[in-house]
Amino acid sequence: MTPHFEHHAGVRHFIHGGLPQGPRLLDCTVPDSQELRIVLPLASNVAEQLIKALEGRRYGSAVGRILCGGASHLSYHRMVVTDQPERPYDYGAPVVLDGYITFISGAITVGRDTQGAPLLHCHAGFLDRDGRQHGGHLVLDKLVVGSEPMVIRLCLFDHVAYQVQPDDETHFNLLHPVFQEVS
Amino acid sequence: MNAVATVEESEVLGGRLGRLVIARLKPNEDIIDSAEALCAAHGITLAVVRGGLGSLIDAQLCYLGRNGMQQIKVDGPGVEILSLSGEISQGASRLQAVVADCDGNLYAGRLERGANLSFITVELTLQEWLPD
């Protein structure tokens, strides 16, 4: 199928290259959660520190927010048009920022890769030192805390994980909720 | 003569957080409709958003201005969800978002029902609110 747009009731839909398959909502439930507040110090690498904070804890995955903080270096991606017929939109080249960066908001999912290792997915918005706005897919491996500590809240849950799996409809590898025992 | 405003009593509700619903929205699914459908499927009458991350085809936000509700249209595809918050209650959900367009510009506002469709994926996690 050729990816294309359709309009229904005045709202734009996008039909991807792969066949749409049901159900359209995938979900799992767990009875409760565990909460963490993590304060990352200046000059720390956010991915490394988050993984370290989660080591030894029993959890399948986690979701959370960047509540506040600054950065001295980061790299993020925005969606661009590609020349790939099966995947006409994808993340472009990284946008790299240095200097004083102030966070406005951020969402984090701690999923699992195919080997069961933690996989970090983050979208965030921030201001650079000239006050310009930026927002997109943030690479936590390249995020260095600066100016002030960064506070992250995570909601951990067990028995269910956001597991990365290939998605035949979009041709991306995406996080899917699955029941899972993680020790 | 100055009008006297009538102030209603605040509603104070004790309770606790209950079950988590951990979900993925496939393409072309609306966030509010999906959140309400997930809650209905699990018999949840009130829930809060614990996590919302993904991309939208386009975003349609709104806010109350001097001349009524004003729309903020953010063109995609690939509008990134940077923050999602609010409550889910059947037919009366109120969700707010911060999003970024494909140039990295930020927008914020309340989501309009039926007009914020998942582009590639949305990871949505809701948690039940259980009143005492």
Image (cartoon, coloured by chain):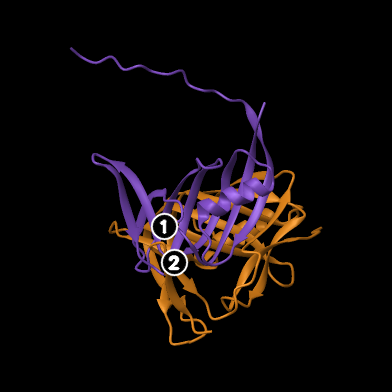
Q: Which of the chains is orange?
A: A
User: In terms of depth relative to the viewer, which is nearer, A45 or B6?
Assistant: B6
Q: Residue at x 44, y 66 (%)?
A: B57
* Colour of chain B as rendered: purple
Please tell me whether mark 1 sits on a helix, a strand or a loop.
strand
Please tell me whether mark 2 sits on a helix, a strand or a loop.
loop
Report the side of A162 relative to B77 (left or right).
right
Say whether residue B91 is visible: yes
Q: Earlier in the sequence, mark 1 or mark 2?
A: 2
Position in image of residue B117 (x %, y %): 48, 61
Q: Which residue is mark 1?
A: B99
Which image quadrant is residue B48 in? top right
User: In terms of depth relative to the viewer, which is nearer, A129 or B65?
Assistant: B65
Chain letter of mark 2 equals B
For residue B57, the mark is 2
Dot 1 amino acid type: Val
Q: From this view, report whether residue B25 is shown above or below residue A169.
A: above
**Structural distance between the alpha carbons of marks 1 and 2:** 12 Å
Dividing the image into 4 quarters, which one contains the C terminus of chain A?
A: bottom right
Label 1 crowd (10 A; few <14 / some 14-19 / many >=20) = many
Position in image of residue A128 (x %, y %): 34, 59
Position in image of residue B26 (x %, y %): 58, 65
Q: Residue at x 36, y 57 (%)?
A: B106
Chain letter of mark 1 equals B
Report the side of A141 relative to A162 (left or right).
left
